[in-house]
Image (cartoon, grey):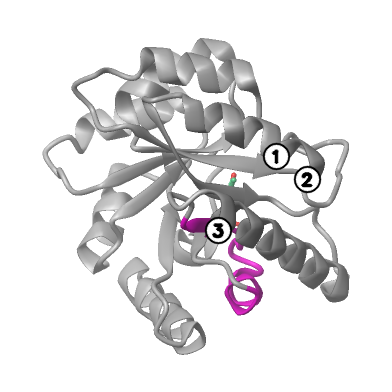
Amino acid sequence: MTIASRWQKISEQIAHLANGCDITVIAVSKHQTTSSIKQAYAAGARHFGESYLQEAIDKIKQLQSVNDINWHFIGPLQSNKTRDIAAHFQWVQSVSRTKIAQRLNDQRAETLPALNVLLQVNISADPAKSGLKPAEINSLATTVMRLPRLKLRGIMCIPAKTDDQHQLTEDFKHMFNIYQQLQQQYSCVDTLSMGMSSDYLQAVANGANMVRIGSALFGPRKS
Ligand SMILES: *Cc1c(COP(=O)(O)O)cnc(C)c1O
């Protein structure tokens, strides 16, 4: 199967489940070539997700002439990455610390639109994963709302790997709950990012309006 035919299939499945709601598909292009990215773009993808900063910047520069791509940083965040992320990306999905939010705000150029931010939630309370505990979300949301160069758009999660479909559904439902509460507080909140190659249909069925799909679109990653 080609990238174009996989994109087509994924889009149709999601549209069928979404009941007229807009679902944004992030093509997760980490470890994929610019040639693969161009194929996904030609098929209709406009949002791309990257986890590794240097690799991402190289590809963003190569694709600079394609000016309607939205780049999402979805990988782990450290202080030494914030300057380049603020310069090259439209979205950051993995914010979970005040210090990182503050730096992204301070480093986002006035000439660029505010940087779209999702707060990463460790919804499965997985000790190996970063992200906020549900009880910590309000405090960081308040902070991000006060930072003028950041725009709070919502929350994202990476649930722990599990074969327990019931547990996964519970985690997605919990995220949707948190999302709805946040939306009631802040009218700028409009994005619930959850669901990957193995579970995107389940995520959409439980209220996701952004899914992040890598291998199901591009095929297996090389490394
Ligand atoms: C790699 C990655 C994805 C995509 O994973 P697939 O299983 O290949 O779809 C989604 N979200 C994050 C945060 C990732 O790191």
The amino acid sitting under disc 1 is Ile
177 horizontally vs 214: left or right: right
Vertical position of residue 182 compared to residue 149: above or below: below
Instruction: Answer few, some or many: residues within 10 Å of disc 1's Cα (few below 14, many 20 plus, some between 14 and 19).
Output: some
Please state the extent of the stretch shown in magenta in the rendering. 190-206
Q: Quadrant of the N terminus?
A: bottom left
Q: Amino acid at mark 2?
A: Pro
- Is the C-beta separation of discs 3 and 1 under 8 Å? no
Circle 3 residue: 192
- Helix, strand or loop under label 1: helix
Q: Which residue is drawn at the image coordinates 43% and 69% (left, top)?
A: 23
Q: Measured along the vertical axis of the image, is residue 205 above or below residue 30?
A: below
- Whichever of callouts 3 and 1 sits on the residue coming sooner in the sequence is 1
* Type of the residue with mark 3: Leu
Relative to the observer, which residue lies in front, 38 or 135?
135
What residue is pinned by disc 1?
Answer: 137
Is 148 in the magenta?
no
Residue 8 coordinates in the image, percent (x, y): 35, 78
Mark 1 vs ligand 1: CB below 8 Å: no
36 lies above or below 162: above
Q: Which residue is mark 2?
A: 134
- Residue 180 visible (yes or no): yes
Residue 48: percent from left, percent from top: 38, 49
Question: Is the shortest distance between ligand 1 and the CB of mark 2 under 8 Å?
Answer: no
Near-viewer residue (177 or 108): 177
Nearer to us of marks 3 and 1 is 1
> Label 3's element?
strand
Residue positioned 45% across, 53% down in the render: 187
Residue at image location 42% in from the left, 56% down from the top: 27
Whether label 2 touches label 1, CB < 8 Å: yes
Give the number of the disc on residue 171. none
Query: Image quadrant for the C terminus?
Result: top right
